[in-house]
Image (tube, rainbow, N blue to C red):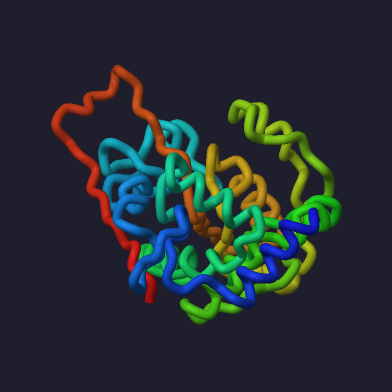
Amino acid sequence: MNTERFKNFLAETFFPKSFTCDICGVETFKTNLCPDCAETVDFIGEGCCPVCGRKTVRPEICLECKEKPPLFKKAVSAFVYENGGVLLIKKFKDGNGYLKEYFADLLAEKIKNLPAADCIVYVPMTKKAQRRRGYNQSELLAYSLSKRINIPVIKDALKKVKETDEQKSLAKSERAKNLSGCFAVNKPEEIKGKNILLADDVMTTGVTAEEITRALLAAGALNVYSCAVASVEYKITKTDNASDIKSKKDVPHTRA
């Protein structure tokens, strides 16, 4: 982790911004986003897949989940990973740890749509990757979320056992191959017989959640549910009839 990023992380974690927009920095009044920046973030409402939680044109199961149901039972996310949503996630990864509070507020509302979990686990990083960044953003999120929903975090429940190639440019099948056998359960005795909530910052193809769920189920977990701050929108094909159905959009950008 470079010096500038480390300073930024410490400052934002222990001295969070109170009245400025989390994207552009303009002064606001008790809101996380100014009106202009709020328009650039596509908050996910009812128009989403009820399984993977990604935004869809129709509020029904997406074709991917129909063709191959994921191992996790259900997933939710707060906003679409594009435009202002990308900027928020990038800031979170680049040392602005205070965003964990805003993200946890958003996810606490979304999690009301999930069955009750017994504990929270988070997506792990290798020691090398965590040293480079300075922190695990999914871990920060998990602990902030825990305070809001009264569900304990199992610290270091999972470990990433190998370094992987950068995922951004890989197709879903390539991502699955890249992450195959990548995750292991550290504390099976705390996982067995439990309903697990997995916390992450972004869901793109769902492969990470799928591979972690595979490891958790093998360790004896009953069910796994997933929550991510942002997710990539599911794009329908031309053969799907999108007709006049519109997805609903909420704009929960008020700071508590």
Q: Residue furthest left?
A: 244
Q: In the depicted view, which residue is nearer to us: 15 or 153?
A: 15
Specify whether 143 is left or right of 21.
Answer: right
Q: Residue at x 63, y 72 (%)?
A: 13
Q: Residue at x 24, y 43 (%)?
A: 247
**At which x and y percent is residue 79?**
40, 51
Q: Residue 236's image quarter?
A: top left
Q: Residue 159's image quarter?
A: bottom right
Q: Residue at x 46, y 59 (%)?
A: 25
Q: Residue at x 60, y 73 (%)?
A: 143
Specify whether 100 is left or right of 53.
Answer: right
Q: Please identify the quadrant where the N terminus is shown.
A: bottom right
Q: Residue furthest front?
A: 27
Q: Please identify the quadrant where the C terminus is shown.
A: bottom left
Q: Is residue 49 above or below residue 30?
A: above
Specify whether 225 is left or right of 193.
Answer: left
Specify whether 144 is left or right of 41.
Answer: right
Res 44 seen here: no
Res 204 seen here: yes
**At which x and y percent is residue 93?**
63, 54
**At which x and y percent is residue 103?**
48, 63
Q: In the depicted view, which residue is nearer to us: 230 or 26?
A: 26
Total marks in image: 0
Q: In the depicted view, which residue is nearer to us: 4 or 205?
A: 4
